[in-house]
Amino acid sequence: MGSCLSSSGGGSRRSLHGSPHVPGPGRRKRPPKRRPGSCSSSFDNTDEPLLHRIPGRMFLNGSTDTASLFSQQGKKGPNQDAMIVWENFGSVADTVFCGVFDGHGPYGHIVAKRVRDLLPLKLGSHLESYVSPEEVLKEISLNTGDRKISEDLVHISANGESRVYNKDYVKDQDMIQNLIGSIVKAYTFMDKELKMQVDVDCFCSGTTAVTMVKQGQHLVIGNIGDSRAVLGMRNKDNKLVPFQLTEDLKPDVPERIKRCRGRIFALRDEPGVARLWLPNHNSPGLAMARAFGDFCLKDFGLISVPDVSYRRLSEKDEFVVLATDGIWDVLTNEEVVEIVAKAPTRSSAGRALVEAAVRNWRWKFPTSKVDDCAVVCLFLDSEPNRLSTASFSKEKHINNGLTEPEPDTASSSTPDSGTESPELKGVNRIDTLVNLPVYVPTKE
């Protein structure tokens, strides 16, 4: 597992929101040659390497004292998953930005990496400016899905109405309000910028995103799509249990989509998987209600407004796992928390999760291609070599941090449960996108 912790490289470096270093007189840089047919980045050829050299920014397999990242390509083509951990985000101590992104469509791998690179920069720029509560409520008014409200997790909106966090519960209200508003704004501007990209086609390609900003004891999560964030915490009996921080945003709440003339139905061979379709064509069959990109569906109910939630951390909270659906399709929340807690070292936690998921893919879906997997594990205390000592309510054989599959547990969990999910009954595997849109010219 190679480490990819960015370093400054000894010379002048680019600040988070500053200008790139300009070479001195007489040292004119010659732009590198581009290969024919290659897609350029949204950064120019001098900016992108500088971004990748920012200290504390990780985007490939590796680890720090408090984080473990690991991604593995599946068997269906290029790895369309991307991930990032950015410590001291915004040059603020004890602030970490984390995210996982699951691309789909012919250019999904490019879209996911583009969002990975640009979204944190947009968030950082919005954090520097005040965002009024009215602007936040205007943005999240587009959110029309049913959301659960928990005493431990404060959601921002539900059923099309804004549910702002309890002001008596949340401390540092101005800072939290600004962070929440900045996340909503950053997602909005990110999607608009993707639409203007000329070097990558986002019309039939897109990506999910689960991002998290931890600032001190404050945790704010933004989510679109069906990747997931789960917290490992101790209950009153000192047992380590999962607490799901996000909801998988599937197109199973049809009001907004129907108002926009989109259609929702499941295919015959996967009756539990609701998909979003164009009004007059049986395509593209997107298995989510929100995503970056996918502009063929943006006029028909697909949105990029994030579902935002807040949690104040306590001493009972041990770590957070962000992962793409390649993990959650074959591992339950309980299994994920257990694998991370019993990993030999923190640095191996991400790899242990991915390897367990790959094994379960091969066992549960032997005729299917293994999906791409990406994991970010963020540990919430400052002891780098500390492992969880919490006990579990259900013992299971563990070998080097990997679950040994048993015949009677071949199921994927619904949130916070160990029961079988109907989405996986009778389905070899769940593809995010069924096929690409095929348009027939119509008269206006």
Image: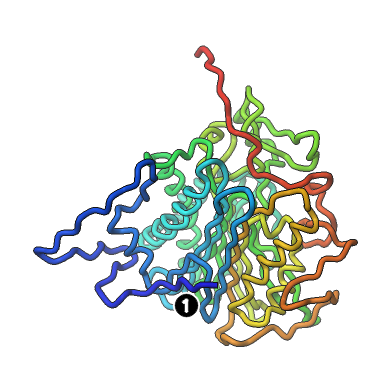
Quarter of the picture holding the N terminus? bottom right
Kind of residue sitting beneath label 1: Asp
Image point (56%, 59%), residue name: 100
Q: Position of residue 323 (x, y in %)?
A: 62, 61
**Which residue is the extreme one toward the top?**
443
Q: Is 279 in front, or is 409?
A: 409
Residue tagged 1: 94
Q: Above or below — where is 64 with respect to 177?
A: below
Q: Is residue 166 visible?
A: no
Instruction: Identify the residue at image location x=77%, y=68%.
Output: 334
Q: Position of residue 227 (x, y in %)?
A: 63, 55
Left or right, 156 with respect to 134, comes to right
Q: Residue at x 63, y 30 (%)?
A: 283
Alpha-carbon neighbours of circle 1 within 10 Å: few (<14), some, or many (≥20)? Answer: few
The colour scheme used to paint the residues is: rainbow
Name the element at disc 1: loop
Asked if residue 244 can be seen in this view, the reply is yes
The part of the image, by quadrant, that contains residue 399 is: bottom right
Between residues 299 and 139, which one lies in front from this camera angle?
299
Q: Residue at x 73, y 69 (%)?
A: 242
Horizontally, residue 260 falls left or right of residue 21, namely: right
